[in-house]
Amino acid sequence: MKHESVQNYYGEVLQGSADLQTNACCTPDDMPDHVKKILSKIHDEVLTRYYGCGLIAPLDLEGMSILDLGCGAGRDVYALSAMVGEKGRVVGVDMTAEQLDVARAHQDFHAQAFGYAASNVEFHHGYIEKLDELDLEPGSFDIIVSNCVINLATDKEAVLRGAHRLLKEGGEMYFSDVYADRRVPQAMAEDEVLYGECLSGALYWNDFLSVSRKAGFGDPRRVTHRPLTIENPVLEERVAPLKFLSATYRLFKLSALETACEDYGQAVIYKGTIPHAPHLFELDDHHAIETGKVFPVCGNTWMMLKDTRFAQHFDFIGDFSTHYGIFDGCGGESPFEASGATNSATPGEAPSGGCC
């Protein structure tokens, strides 16, 4: 699918989220209260032009430098600018000029709404497959986000390679996108409506894992996922028998990550100091770490906590001096077969250690 088709769909065909024909590019209503409070201050026109499929607001963002790939009209850029604060910065990149015009038109509005200068936000016109052509310093971002956009890219691996290049060591890519339960047939991939609706450009979930590792992101971690029901009988018939889901992944730029979760007898203790997570920190959908409790982890998870911005919030037990084999319970199940429930602790029930 050519860039021109996507630009036309998002710049001219879609005038607002109500024009979408499926529920693929729609974020679920459930979100933390602190995020809802920030979104309530976003300009209505920016909100109307939102086409995301997930919540790309990881915790502990104060002072961070963030890049948003496919920022559109800037909803997530402005929300994140409030979370990083005046000492942080958020950069948005998008290929659709009409969307960027909306984003830039409301820059002063959001600077006033959040109480500091608009200098912590900037927008670039360009392709996320060609990040090296933009004036962005390699290794200069703590976090890279993207919300239901990589499926629209013509070269997904190039996007991930570019993101890896721009991240600092220990930084992460935290993003939501649409995935298919099998490889999309070529005829379907050429359907402009299905492509624009974030369906026929979706990667097969297992190909995504392979592409991520090839781009330098060892051990991709799924944070959340939910099935997409399409809810459009005509388009449901055109995509059958494929199934789709929206998922949020985090990819850490850590050169020492191993290809499997290995056991070194390590554990961590969460201090409960991450803002908005006083009792439980969820690294991904199988690491829900209760405050104050010794939590066994594999070597990869140890590095994801110790060699990143999260280190100050944990105490660490053990080292890499003794290897005990594969971490018990490590696997690679399809998200289409997973229950979708996280291991979050419920009252009276503490989470256990565990890896993939």
Image (cartoon, grey):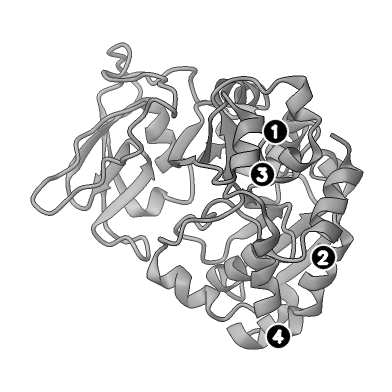
Q: Secondary structure at mark 4?
A: helix
Q: Nearer the viewer, mark 3 or mark 2?
A: 2
At which x and y percent is residue 258? 48, 20
Q: Residue 51 falls in which quadrant of the image?
A: bottom right
The answer to which of marks 4 and 3 sits earlier in the sequence is 4
Q: Secondary structure at mark 1?
A: loop
Residue 313 visible (yes or no): yes
Question: CA–CA distance between discs 1 and 4?
Answer: 36 Å
Q: Are marks 2 and 1 in contact (CB under 8 Å)?
A: no
91 displayed left or right of 232:
right
**Farthest-out residue, left:** 348
Question: CA–CA distance between discs 4 and 2?
Answer: 15 Å
21 in relation to 234, above or below: below
The answer to which of marks 4 and 2 sits earlier in the sequence is 2
The answer to which of marks 1 and 4 sits earlier in the sequence is 4
- Disc 4 residue type? Phe
265 displayed left or right of 106:
left
Quick one: 344 or 273, which is closer to the camera? 344
Circle number at residue 167: 3
Q: Are marks 4 and 2 in contact (CB under 8 Å)?
A: no
- Disc 1 residue type? Ser
Q: Which residue is mark 4?
A: 109
Q: Residue 87 falls in which quadrant of the image?
A: bottom right
Q: Are marks 3 and 1 in contact (CB under 8 Å)?
A: no
- Disc 3 residue type? Leu
Quick one: 72 or 274, which is closer to the camera? 72
